[in-house]
Image (cartoon, rainbow, N blue to C red):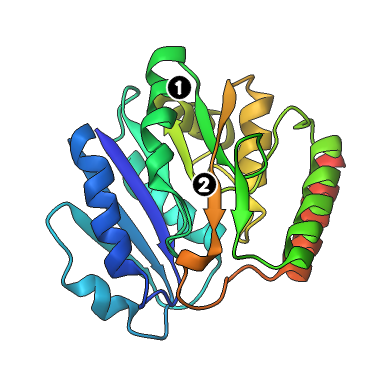
Amino acid sequence: MIHAVVPVLNEESNVGSLILRLEEALTPHAPYRVLFVDDGSTDGTASALGGRAPGILVVSHPRNLGPGAAFRTGFAEVLRTLQPTDLVLTLEGDGTSDLAVLPRMLGRIRHEDDDIVLASCYLFGGGIKGTSLHRVGLSHIANGLVKQTLGLSGLATLSSFFRVYQGRALLRLREAFGETLFVSNGFESQIEILHLAAKLSMRISEVPMVLDGSRRLGKSKMKILRTSLAYLRLIARYRT
């Protein structure tokens, strides 16, 4: 079973096409289910998800709590029935991830027994399109600092939402760190998960992907300065 967890915030214009792309990508790997976590959207996202197809579930936050909180909610729902041999897919709700690389990610999990596989725009063969240079530059600086200080220097990317987890990996994280798995509420939560997984000596690998901002209708929800400050707070928490 593949469980897909997708946080969404004001993605009315994107969720319809994303559902179709997910169905196309996941049908060859059935059975699967897709869980959208609506993180307090104030547009028509809830209505757009209302006509969802079978196998699509939705849980909602009454207000915006952040992508980390949305992932905690999604993981808590998945962990209710998760088996060690299940897989958990996560990705952005704005449609920027290239689902064409999913078979390669699943291959890494199934044939090389990795615990977590990331889709990386910074790995050789990947790239970024439709995103301003200053956002890319600030992201590189922040990622570089975090890699050196939290023992993740072997990875090209840290903040990608597009990942596949072995079910056993999330179960081990819960056993080691409690029901919440991690504590960050923002985009830095994705780095925190990797840091905790590395502490458990999990196998983490990457496959290249082109992150295409032109697929997104509307603006990115990531605020670079706010997220960079959150990265620094994360470093301070774990370094002390």
Q: Which residue is mark 2?
A: 180
Q: Amino acid at mark 1?
A: Arg
* Numbered disc 1: secondary structure: helix
Locate the N terminus by quadrant. top left
Residue furthest top in the image: 112
Give the image quarter of residue 223. Answer: bottom right
**Residue 60: x %, y % from top left:** 35, 69
CB contact under 8 Å: marks 2 and 1:
no
Residue sitting nearer the eye, 72 or 7: 7
The front one of 60 and 49 is: 49
- Vertical placement of residue 177 versus 19, above or below: above
Residue at 38%, 50% in the rendered image:
5
Left or right: residue 183 versus residue 3 is right
Task: Please identify the quarter of the rendering in which residue 184 is found.
Answer: bottom right
Q: Relative to 134, say whether 167 is above or below.
A: above
Looking at this view, is 33 or 237 the one in front? 33
Q: Looking at the image, which residue is at 43% across and 38% down?
A: 101
Q: Residues within 10 Å of mark 1 (few under 14, many from 20)?
A: many
Above or below — where is 141 with respect to 195?
below
Q: What x and y, as percent, mark residue 104? A: 42, 29
- The amino acid at mark 2 is Thr
Judge whether residue 166 can be spotted in this image. no
Q: Position of residue 13 (x, y in %)?
A: 36, 77
Which residue position holds label 1? Answer: 108
- Specify the quadrant that holds the C terminus: top right
The tag earlier along the polypeptide, 2 or 1, is 1
| Tag 2 secondary structure | loop
Residue 56, image x and y in percent? 21, 56
